[in-house]
Amino acid sequence: MSVFGEKKGHQLRVNLLHGAEVTPKETADQIPIDRSVVAREMDVAEGLATALKISFQSLDLGGLPCPVKAFEDNQHVDRLLQLYKYIHKILYFCLPMKAIDPHRPIRVMGILNLTPDSFYAPSRHNLAILESGADLIDIGACSTRPGSRPVGAKEEWRRLKATLRLIREEYPGLPLSLDTYWAEVVLRAYDLVGPFIVNDVTAGEADPAMLPAVAELGLTYIPMHHGPASDAEEILDWYRTISQRLDDQGIRDWIVDPGFGFGKDVEQNFGVFHTLGQLKSLQRPLLVGISRKRMVWMPLGLTPETAGEATQRLHLEALRLGADILRTHDVAATRATVALYRQSAGAGTL
């Protein structure tokens, strides 16, 4: 089967002369591309496959030429991939805003750090965030800022248990996310408060018992990307691999987090940010965690303490690019940003 549906032929058929341009009358359906030829480099998600069915006639390319060469049988595979990626880019830059539903559920995730050394001091032991109106609270008992050191599962649990008891007794039903990479912490927390989201910055690499524990308890999982990446396409490739591991373990409910600031410098962070919409092809909720991080304040000569407004400006752009969850230190300001986004997209009123 081709990426466009059932086709009798499995070779590329481009009815153009060598060097000819695609005119608005040519449609993507007239260019069947066999999935087996391109899967090794472009395992396109169903969303993109659907988008590729759209007629070029419906695209406003502004006169942009599409230099397509003729192909013969199985030869010139590199040129085939170039054509495919070119179409991908045309669709990405022409259609992303149309493909993102401004009515979609958007959640604000408040940050509660039970640590003495998290990079943004006001977030430390800030129990007031429990009453801030956040859709869910992400609780961390070990700082993951650059240069921080692990404290171990036992110390994490010592820091966590009193607050979890408080939440169970005084805020029953408040959705929680637990920022940990230890299966022992997950199991103890589940016994105390029941189901929550597991936010693992190592994607199961730090503790081999993590994925089996998440699967056994049937919890939602956030396997965060960590390490260098110049754009979202590199992260997309990583998630294609990690998704197989999750599936093998029986983890069906998981969230995408590109891991801003984790192994990425400022330039790389923005390379990922600008192409964020590509991650929507995974058809999973997309979490963006940029609140007051270095990528926000350093280019502007600010500090984490003075980067609140800049964070919200990037939050607004992240929503336009498809973010479904905003992890934030500033719940009220972020909820206002979500409201402005919906208003500007014609999906709500203030």
Image (cartoon, helix red, strand yellow):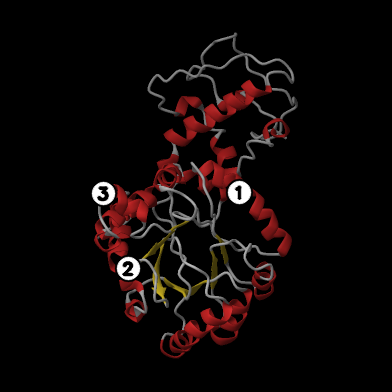
Mark in front: 2 vs 3: 3
For label 2, the residue is 331
Quadrant of the snapshot with the C terminus: bottom left
SS at badge 2: helix
Callout 2 crowding tier (Cα within 10 Å): few <14, some 14–19, many ≥20: many
N-term-proximal mark, 1 vs 3: 1
Q: Dots 1 and 2: beta carbons under 8 Å?
A: no
Amino acid under label 2? Val
For mark 3, does the 10 Å Cα neighbourhood hold few (<14), some (14 to 19), or many (20 or more) residues?
Answer: few
**Which residue position holds label 3?**
300
Label 3 amino acid? Answer: Leu
Above or below, comparing residue 91 to residue 262 in the picture: above
Which residue is rendered at x = 50% and y = 68% of the image? 149
Q: Which residue is mark 1?
A: 238
Q: How packed is label 1: few (under 14 Cα within 10 Å), some, or many (20 or more)?
A: some
Quadrant hosting residue 330: bottom left
Q: Which mark is residue 218?
A: none
